Image (cartoon, rainbow, N blue to C red):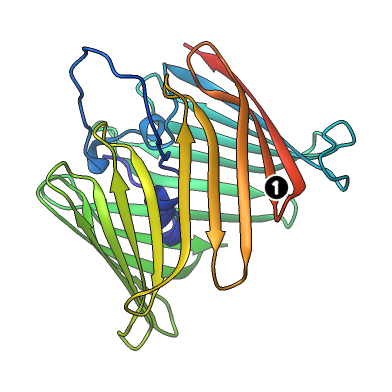
Amino acid sequence: MVKTTKFFGILFIFILLLSFVGCKKKNNDEIIIIPDAQKNHLQVSHLKGKVKIVTTKSYYTSHKDSISQKTLKSIVIQQYSSDGYIIKVVTLDSNDDTVRVRNVEYNGDVKQTKWTENDFSNHSTSFSKFNYDMNGYISGEEYYSSDTLVYSIQYKTDGLGGITEIIKNNKQFSLKNQLQYNDKGLLIRMDEYDPNGKLFKYVQYEYDNYGDEVNRKVFRGMNNMVEFTYTQYDLKGKLIKEIYQNEEHGLKEIKTYPSHDQKGNWTFEIFTANNDTIYFRKRDIIYY
């Protein structure tokens, strides 16, 4: 089973990459809920169909509510295998010059063994290597920058291969995260601890009957909620809107998705913060 590569990438696999669902169209088909540990990268990103290449163009605008006056900032091209795993990511700048290239390697069991990223903007290379236990579940990771070990990560997993503990070690200190799942293998809580082992914050997740996340709440300390995320879908399950609020900083961010392709994947995203349009993204998807 393939896991994300960097420490916060592992965390964001559950926080940022999983889609959030409001209401969906009911049908007579059997509902199959896939545990987090058994999802491929397409399922984690909530991409539907046999996706081969996703090209995402990001634009910024300095004019409120004006998407016609735009400036291209970057282009990201993601390439997936036929069984739904990321194999290459290319990032281009506004001049179509290649900025970064990441290649991902797998073994015969389709488990990620290494990724290597070349950053042409600062002429550097970084990579991560992964280890697995006798059950084939991830047990460790080492991240290198220019052949220098930056940090290592130890993982503990449950019977399904879901990560239950993450300990990141660097030269200065260690950080620990603990994760809990429900009986469907879906993440329901993640605790983050500071270097002294004290609970820093925790995140709670709620799901609908389809196994899709509907609410995410972030608490500082014990019961002080500081962040909240809710995402709305239409009756056919297409992503329509994602709302994020940060109570500490009085920030409200809204992402809207006004267009989708025939598979139901969004092709246009508008991002606003405190009612000002900040950027938008266009996405083109090629299928197998």
Residue 82: horizontal and vertical position, in percent? 39, 18
Which corner quadrant holds the N terminus?
A: top left
Front residue of 287/265: it is 265
Question: From the viewer's perspective, is 182 left or right of 247?
Answer: left
> Residue reaching furthest bottom?
196
Please indicate whether residue 30 sits to the left or right of residue 125 in the image: left
Locate residue 219: give its quadrant: bottom left
Residue holding disc 1? 272
Residue 142 in picture, x, y percent from top left: 38, 62
**Which amino acid type is marked by label 1?**
Thr
Q: Say which residue appears at 56% left-offset and 73% top-offset.
A: 248
- Of residues 116 and 99, the one nearer the viewer is 99
Residue at 81% in and 40% down: 65
In the picture, measured across the screen, residue 159 lies left or right of residue 4, that is left
- In the image, residue 55 above or below residue 131: above
Near-viewer residue (131 or 29): 29
Above or below residue 172? Residue 59 is above
